[in-house]
Image: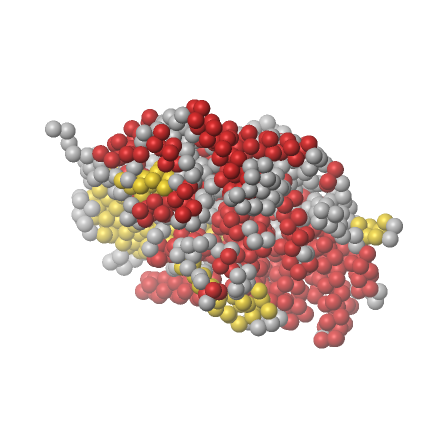
Amino acid sequence: MPPAAAKLSFRAVVFDMDGVVTRTADLHAAAWKELFDDYLRARADRGAGMFEPFDAKGDYLAYVDGKPRQEGARSFLAARGITLPDGSPDDPPDAETIYALARRKDELFERRLQRRGVAVFDSTTALIHVLRSRAVATAVVTSSRHGREVLQSAHVTALFDVILDGTDAARLELKGKPDPDIFLAAAEHLKLAPRQCIVIEDAAAGVMAGRHGGFGLVIGVDRGGNRQALMRSGADIVVADLGEVDVDALDRRFRNRTSASPREPEDAWRVEQEGFDPAREHEMESLFTVGNGYLGVRGSLDMPLPGSQADLFVAGIYDRKQPALPYSELEFLTARRDEYAYAERVPLPFPYRLRVSVGGRTLDLVEGPWRELRRVLDLRHGGLQLFYLFEDKQGRRTAIETWRCASLAEPHLLLQEVTVTCENHDALVEIDTSLHDPDLADHDPHLRALVPESADDVELRAYATQASGYTVALASRARLSGESRDRVYVQAQGKAGVALRLRRCVAIHTNRHDADPIAAARARAQGFSWDAFDRARAAHEACWAEVWRSADVTIGGSVATTQALRFNAYHLRIAANRDPRTSIGARTLSGRAYEGHVFWDVEIFMLPYFVRTFPDIARSLLLYRYYTLDGARSRALSLGYRGACYAWESTVTGADATPRQIILKTSHKKIPIYTGHEQVHVTADIAFAVIRYFEATGDAAFMTEAGAEILFETARFWASRCVRKDDRYHIEAVTGPDEYHHTVNDNAYTNWMARFNLEHAGRMQRWLARQAPEIWKALRSKLAIADEEPALWAAVAEALYLPQANASGVIEQFEGYFELRDYVVPASERFHPPLRRLFESEKINGMQLIKQADVLMLPLLFPERFTREVLAANYRYYEPRTDHASSLSPAVHATLAARLGLPEQAQDYWRRGLWLDLSNTMGNGALGIHAASMAGAWQTLVYGLLGIHVGDDGPVVDREAGRRLPARWQSVELSLYHHGKRYPLRWTAGEEER
Ligand code: IFM
């Protein structure tokens, strides 16, 4: 008798129909093509735009695949900048409405169906038979109204316990994919929870729906060219055909995945990862970073592997560029920059390093053999746990559990706890806690090891940076439980089932804060009492409880969304500290990308978040700009201007650290980078943030001590940077936020921001002269502000040319932009890092293709200055021309789509930003998380989806918010600061109707 097959953990599989079960996807694609090509050609013939045919692959997959017909038509046309009225279901097929087009598509599809009949994928039906023989229920869903007929003609209805098609979806008022409604309804009909089911889909929108519905596992089927999109949309596995699926292997994946997917409220407090995938290990290290803003440590394994990027970063520790380290992508490098000693943030040795051996055998993932690995990031308490299970050929199992944190209460202190249990055997256990890295030169090429005088009970390590003269000292103490002395290397007899516990503290100091960092590290480590370990942990956790009082956002009805929001809030908090001499790098202290440089990301994307959650951190981030004013002044001078011109990429002195070129690793081609000297809008962005901070906090002390000086010096810069031609001022040779176009004149965004800067400097001068005349006097003399200067700022502001909306309501991005070759971005080219574009940088400089929101930043930052019509016209124009190669872009589009009453687009863009790191949707998480996107997603939720308005009486949620929020949400709770007071806010579904 064959052995009985093991019971499977998943209870049902929900199949998408077209392209997964039936071979109907190509019929749909062909019908859409015929429909759109006819329509677009007819439009072009009457002079409304150029004819650009529908791409039956790219456009089909991106805009219509998996969606209900009306939605598909609307979303493709929107991508081409065409908006049609919805019309009504009775519209004749030749009417120019969404309903009419959808109906025509239906007719074209039916005609094809009748001609060709329906074939099925045999591998899919074979899988269904195996599943059913193993007591797994099956369902099929489709947004096609003909779903049932199609299944009947294919003779497969008997294979499914539940069938839901477009007709059912309309009757049940289910929203189309990427909303998860139809999958959720299938699970409900099966009387199962989504987490007990697997979804199988071939469309990116469907994969997203499965993911957002909280299904246990989502399988993508790539029938050609769609693998990346399916992965980016959140597929756990992508196969070319279901013939590749082995049900038992699938069950293992399901068990691993479901232990990681959030379902219970408590799951929203942690992020888990099971198993080990060498290709994704660097990405995991970024996600599982612990830190406290003073320092960050990547979430590497305690026993690092040769390829681990087990970095410690201390804020503000930079050194001269090492060309061998990556810049923003692994595929390119930047040259050595000898002239600047603070060009690159320094990776430092891993402070939690362990070597463990049991019975003389090293236990790590190289030596193995390991059976289980799990990482759990405890968001609530700011700690990381790792669980390893090793099992040798003789079946001897050893479990290692570790916990680590970077204390939020005492930022120079790291704690670690290690438990080793020989589960079913006795053996000698050895734990070596030495911080020595034999490959220091490779891992940390900036460092020269110093030889500090060692002390008996403390392991001391110190390093000097090559050019910048920093000293970093680490002092580590470790003690095995039950012992009375500390040892770097411990040995103990392990007994079956008995846990051996080791605790460690590591102190980290640098000469940025301590004259003698080695002594300071030693003193802190030696001063640490083991009796106080639990107290130190409790103090750290109490600080996190405090963090969550201000930063927590909970979504009733979506554990996964709450988890993502908390994950982002966790990362934003561990990126920031209250040291006004440092700020937040684009990828925080979680990775090497962008060399730890500080961009406008802080002032425009993150500041609005900190201002409302941790206003003291916001203040400190602005003070960083105050302390780097001297660098900005020297920069303005060296460029031939007055005042202060902030660095596009900044480190610690205010000097510009942007590389002048990058080098492609493959071809060694050198690509010039213009952003450093041209992206001057950052100067006005900082002034803008100063004003917004002041408005939100009323912090007059900040304004008089630092803010006003920033405003005056930056206004001075603009007054000298603007050039007068005829009767107007212009700003020439700049790069706007869209980095695909350099050396342009009158970039609308730059000009608007400069004008804001000039105007507000003038206002502040008048305010200061009135409120604090002594301070104004002192400042005037310190900065040698001539009597006529404030009037000049006002005059330049007044006469500064601001590109205006044209007859269609569209503002030209810069002089001559509309004359460039038009380019509507196909879906397949969206949301990728800009690497490929770099190969053709000069070509794209001549096209209308843009990298990220540029003109659209204006209605985002100045909502009251643009009518709804102008906002809509610009959104319609620029959105299809944007490839979102920057992680900053989705949140901007999400907020504006929400304001425009386009909830589906808003939610779609929002999810992209919210899950950008957790889903690694840009594929470049290995070098660190994307802090601006995280904070941008928070801004979209608060100001876009919830429509929160902050008036004199504090923040208020818009009564119409429910129209923009996902239908499944029952409530949102959060709190915001305004003028020193924290306002708890709540939105509850259905309340507006009451
Ligand atoms: O500041 C951004 C810029 O807008 C696009 N490139 C990446 C930078 C860092 O995030």
Q: Can residue 195 be spotted in the picture?
A: no
Q: Can residue 746 be spotted in the picture?
A: yes
Residue for point 49% across, 33% down? 107
Q: Nearer the viewer, residue 928 or 858?
A: 858
Q: What quarter of the picture does the N terminus occupy?
A: top left
Is residue 284 toward the left or the right of residue 684 in the image? left
Residue 482 occupies quadrant = bottom left
Q: Nearer the viewer, residue 690 or 640?
A: 690
Q: Position of residue 329 (x, y in %)?
A: 54, 38
Residue for point 40% across, 25% down? 117
Q: Position of residue 538 (x, y in %)?
A: 36, 64
| Placement of 62 over or under 189, stated as above or below | above
Q: How is the image coloured?
A: secondary structure
Residue for point 68% across, 56% down? 866
Q: Nearer the viewer, residue 56 or 686?
A: 56
Is residue 114 toward the left or the right of residue 791 in the image? left
Is residue 433 toward the left or the right of residue 657 in the image? left
Q: Nearer the viewer, residue 523 or 307?
A: 307
Residue 101 occupies quadrant = top right
* Residue that protrudes farthest toward the left in the picture: 1
Q: Position of residue 429 (x, y in %)?
A: 25, 46
Marker count (numbered): 0
* Residue that protrudes farthest toward the top in the picture: 116
Residue for point 78% across, 58% down? 797
Q: Position of residue 777 (x, y in %)?
A: 76, 72
Is residue 848 toward the left or the right of residue 973 in the image? right
Residue 775 occupies quadrant = bottom right
